[in-house]
Amino acid sequence: MSNIFKGTRALVTGASSGLGEQFARQIAAMGADLVITARSTDKLEALAAELHSNNGIDVKVVSQDLAATGGALELCKKVDALGVPIDHLINNAGFGNSSRFHECDLERETQMVRLNSEAVIVLARHFLPGMVSRRKGGVLSVASVAGMPPTPYLSTYGATKAFVVSWTSGVAEELRGSGVRVSALCPGPVPTGFQEAAGVGIDGADKLLVLSAEETVRRGLKAYAQSKVIFVPGAMNKIGMLGVKFTPRNLAARVVGAAMKDSIKGA
């Protein structure tokens, strides 16, 4: 993989744990300075100190809740105040919530839309102009295989990730030839804190789809460096998405719904 990160600076959202922590670790190891953000100041500061010590890079910490109203715009202001250019935006922060939609917690669903979708476009709109003017860098957003078919019992989550996939495809085409890459990483099940927060398990056939957070990020960064627009890591996940592509949506909804009903807690 060509090292597109050395000597640049990346902004990683949701960097305090899971995939976000892995993004920060692996990008730091490639020689990029970082701005890392999440809600947890203590975890971010501990990670920043470790990455600086191990890699000799500059790591700046910005605490921000991107699910709050106006949270993404507030993060833009805080990063601007640091006075450093952002060459790579890693839109990783996100969460899911399993329920029957008519029984859901509406505030939590709207927070999910703000974090998973709105924050992606607010941050990209803010930082992309600088990337385009410098003709380098790009935006890597974490979507999900759940964004491909309808996802009953995770309907809003799946819709937010479908938004990211569609948005990425459109903007990548707009920026063709600009020197700026725009990619979406669409992982299958990854054992992180996501499952507990979303109220879902990794059971049965889903275990065959699992990749570690470390491997998911490694493959995702390689695909990003290669300017792949939509990337699904893992052979079994790719096969599954081929099946979705040729399955009528109403049938796909039934199949996915049956699988999800077995895996969510309290369904």
Image (cartoon, rainbow, N blue to C red):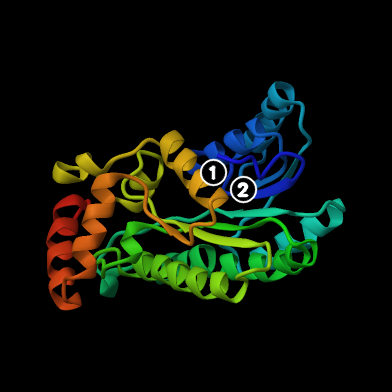
Which quarter of the picture shows residue 216? Answer: top left
| Depth check, front residue: 183 or 117 | 183
The residue lying at 19 percent from left, 50 percent from top is: 263
Query: Nearest the camera: 15 or 225?
Result: 225
Q: Badge 1, how many Cα within 10 Å: few under 14, some, many 20+?
A: many
In the picture, the quarter occupied by the C terminus is bottom left
Q: Amino acid at mark 2?
A: Ala
Q: CA distance from mark 1 to mark 2?
A: 9 Å
Q: Which residue is mark 1?
A: 20
Q: Earlier in the sequence, mark 1 or mark 2?
A: 1
Residue 165: percent from left, percent from top: 44, 67
Q: Quadrant for residue 15, please give it.
A: top right
Give the label on residue 38, or none.
Answer: 2
Whether pointer 1 and pointer 2 mark residues with C-beta atoms closer than 8 Å, the reply is yes
Residue 240: percent from left, percent from top: 22, 56
Q: Going by the image, does 75 lie left or right of 93?
A: right
SS class, disc 2:
strand
- At 49% from the left and 57% from the top, the residue drawn is 228
Residue 235 visible to an observer of this rendering:
yes
245 shown above or below 238? below
Q: Kindly give the residue lying farthest to the top in the view shown.
A: 54
Is residue 202 visible in the rendered image? The answer is no
Q: Is residue 222 left or right of residue 6?
A: left
> Residue type at mark 1?
Gly
- To which quarter of the image does residue 27 belong? top right
**Residue in view at x 44 percent, y 73 percent:** 166
